[in-house]
Image (cartoon, rainbow, N blue to C red):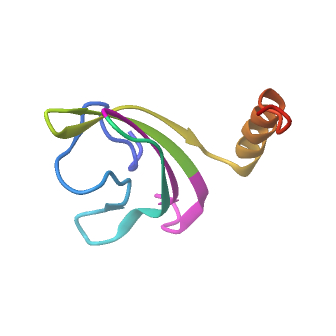
């Protein structure tokens, strides 16, 4: 399991959901750069911009995007699903498809 991955049933007990991860030595493993809420309520969808430390080199890698879905139950958020966009090429491909599916001329 990669360092930014959490079990689908992991709970967010306090504060806001984050993918920021610091190891037991105080070194940042996943640096959250930005967060945008796509939906709020009982089911929350959040898009994160982040960098992840390469375990071989120790350097922070390229920027990535992750989309997470959380379900609120009993006042606690539980992650239910996630999707990571791991490269600029994949991000551009997704953007191009969405623009084709949802042209700006449609209101």
Image: magenta residue range: 42-64
The residue at the far front in this view is 107
Q: Residue at x 34, y 71 (%)?
A: 27
Left or right relative to 64: residue 22: left
Rendering coords of residue 29 (x, y %): 39, 62
Q: Position of residue 99 (x, y in %)?
A: 80, 37
Image vertical order of residue 41 relative to residue 36, above or below: above
Position of 40 compared to 49: left or right?
Answer: left
Which corner quadrant of the image does residue 26 belong to? bottom left
- The picture places residue 68, in percent across and down from the top left corner, at 44, 39
Residue at image location 77% in from the left, 45% down from the top: 92
- Decide if residue 44 is on the left or right side of residue 103: left
Total labels drawn:
0
State whether residue 70 is above or below residue 46.
Answer: above
Q: Is residue 67 magenta?
A: no
Image quarter of the C terminus: top right
> Which quadrant is home to the N terminus?
top left
In front of the other: 24 or 11: 11
Left or right: 16 as drawn, with respect to 5: left
Residue lying farthest to the bottom in this orientation: 26
The one nearer the camera, 62 or 15, is 15
Q: Which residue is painted at 16% across and 39% down in the image?
A: 75
Residue at x-position 23% and y-position 57% = 15
Q: Position of residue 64 (x, y in %)?
A: 58, 53
Quarter of the image for residue 80 reads: top left
Is 63 part of what is drawn in magenta?
yes
- Helix, strand or loop for the magenta stretch, by majority: strand
In the depicted view, which residue is nearer to us: 7 or 91?
Answer: 91
């Amino acid at each position: 399991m990669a360092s930014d991955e959490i079990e689908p049933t992991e709970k967010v007990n306090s504060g806001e959901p984050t993918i920021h991860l610091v190891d037991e030595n105080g070194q940042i493993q996943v640096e959250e750069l930005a967060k945008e809420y796509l939906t709020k309520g009982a089911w929350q969808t959040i898009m994160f911009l982040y960098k992840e430390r390469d375990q071989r080199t120790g350097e922070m890698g390229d920027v990535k995007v992750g989309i997470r879905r959380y379900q609120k139950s009993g006042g606690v958020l539980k992650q239910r699903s996630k999707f990571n966009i791991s490269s600029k090429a994949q991000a551009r491909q997704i953007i191009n498809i969405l623009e084709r599916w949802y042209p700006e001329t449609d209101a």
